[in-house]
Amino acid sequence: MFKRTGYVIEHPGKAASRLRHARAGFTLVELLVALVLLDIGLLALIAVAASITRSAHVSGIEASALSIASARLERAASLACGGGNSGVARANPATTEWFADMPAPNETRVISDSVAVVTSRGIRTIVLRTGARC
């Protein structure tokens, strides 16, 4: 009166309850596969977050360099013409600035400023040039 189905030997009267009990839940292999897929997804999210943080830091450094160059141009443009003026300045060990104020034709001058900053992606250089009347 016993019937063999798969790996479970069942009594004819308890067949339905045994089948439900034998198939309930997930197998260990299914759980391990799900955990591996979840880990891969979490690692990808961590990598994206690190990349975004690094990009935001580099953007902040570049914005600071642009601000330094823009301030120098504004100061130089507000001064009177005085021939040629140039120089180098270091705001900190990671930032170097080159500036020049050169006479140009028709009572004008060309003011330029270059700022080089060290970032995690290498050295970035920002160059600004403008013309001003004397």
Image: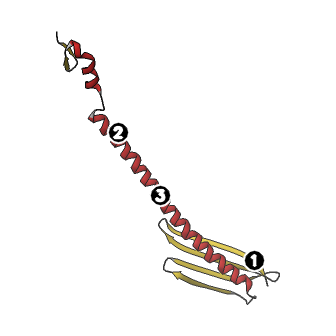
Residue 37, image x, y percentages: 37, 42
Q: As shown in the figure, which amino acid type bears the numbered disc 1?
A: Gly
Q: Which mark is residue 35?
A: none
Viewer-closest of 107 and 70: 70
Q: As shown in the figure, which amino acid type bears the numbered disc 3?
A: Ser
Classify residue 127 by image quadrant.
bottom right
Question: Does residue 63 appear to the left or right of 22 in the view shown?
Answer: right
Task: Report how far apart the C-alphas of labels 2 and 3 lie in the structure.
Answer: 26 Å
- Per the image, the residue denoted by label 1 is 131
Q: As shown in the figure, which amino acid type bears the numbered disc 2?
A: Ala
In the displayed orientation, state which residue is furthest to the bottom: 82
Q: Earlier in the sequence, mark 1 or mark 3?
A: 3
Task: Report how far apart the C-alphas of labels 1 and 3 lie in the structure.
Answer: 39 Å
Viewer-closest of 130 and 60: 60
x 73%, y 82%: residue: 77
Task: Report how far apart the C-alphas of labels 1 and 2 lie in the structure.
Answer: 64 Å
- Per the image, the residue denoted by label 2 is 34
For mark 1, give the secondary structure.
Answer: strand
Q: Which mark is residue 51?
A: 3
Residue 54, image x, y percentages: 48, 62
